[in-house]
Amino acid sequence: MNDGNIVRQRLGELKELADLVAERWGAEIEGLASEVARVLLSGGKVFFCGNGGSAADAQHLAAEYVIKFHHQRKPMPALALTTDTSVLTAGANDLGFEEVFSRQLEAFGRDGDILFLHSTSGESENLLQAAETATACRIRTVGFLARGGGRLLSMVDQAVVIPTDSVPRAQEMHLALGHIICELAEEKVMEGKA
């Protein structure tokens, strides 16, 4: 197969998946944007976490809230639990890697916040513990998942399970949905209503 065919095939897979996700999850994504706006308007924070490529998505999305998405506006409080190397390495060394996100939630999370957990497997111990800690701290949890959702599916308040076994396609959809939620939430916050 030549490179042009690979490009068309991969983009075709993404288009097909985007159409499926829009049909299945469109209303739910709009609802999540309203929920994020409510959290922010009530003084809460948005947390993100994930591993590998999903960690990169977590920090990418947090930056959109803190800096801006489409509009110049006041910063919105969001934090990726994947970015502080001293916290991550001390936590992994002293407590175990499975606690690197949950420990931060204990430190910074409050009742009324929201946590997005990005995972293509739904099986990472650090995400499972983060979901448990968030529930104990009364932080709402949303799983951006794939491949059936794994164990994390039953541990989050709300799950968006991308119908694919492809890790790259799932991560691309997670980021796209995160951007859409941020765009809609930004508009709502600027209008002062969720």
Image: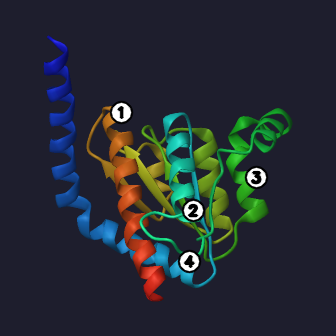
Give the CA separation, mark 3 to mark 2.
Answer: 25 Å
Counting other residues with Cα less than 10 Å from the Cα at mark 1, is it few (<14), some (14-19), or many (20 or more)? Answer: some
Kindly identify which residue carries mark 2.
Answer: 67
Disc 1 marks a residue whose amino acid type is Pro
Q: Position of residue 179 (x, y in %)?
A: 39, 58
In-image side of 125 versus 8 (left or right): right
Whichever of callouts 1 and 2 sits on the residue coming sooner in the sequence is 2
Specify how the rendered protein is coloured.
rainbow
Kindly identify which residue carries mark 4.
Answer: 40
Kindly identify which residue carries mark 3.
Answer: 103
Q: Position of residue 125 (x, y in %)?
A: 61, 40
Kindly identify which residue carries mark 1.
Answer: 168
Give the CA separation, mark 1 to mark 2.
Answer: 26 Å
Q: Nearer the viewer, mark 3 or mark 4?
A: 4
Q: Nearer the viewer, mark 3 or mark 2?
A: 2
Disc 3 marks a residue whose amino acid type is Arg
Whichever of callouts 4 and 2 sits on the residue coming sooner in the sequence is 4
Q: Position of residue 149 (x, y in %)?
A: 39, 46
Q: Nearer the viewer, mark 4 or mark 2?
A: 2
Do the residues under discs 3 and 2 have CB atoms within 8 angstroms? no
Counting other residues with Cα less than 10 Å from the Cα at mark 3, is it few (<14), some (14-19), or many (20 or more)? Answer: some
Residue in front for this viewpoint, 119 or 173: 173
Give the CA separation, mark 3 to mark 1.
Answer: 29 Å
Q: Secondary structure at mark 3?
A: helix
Whichever of callouts 3 and 2 sits on the residue coming sooner in the sequence is 2
Quarter of the figure with the N terminus: top left
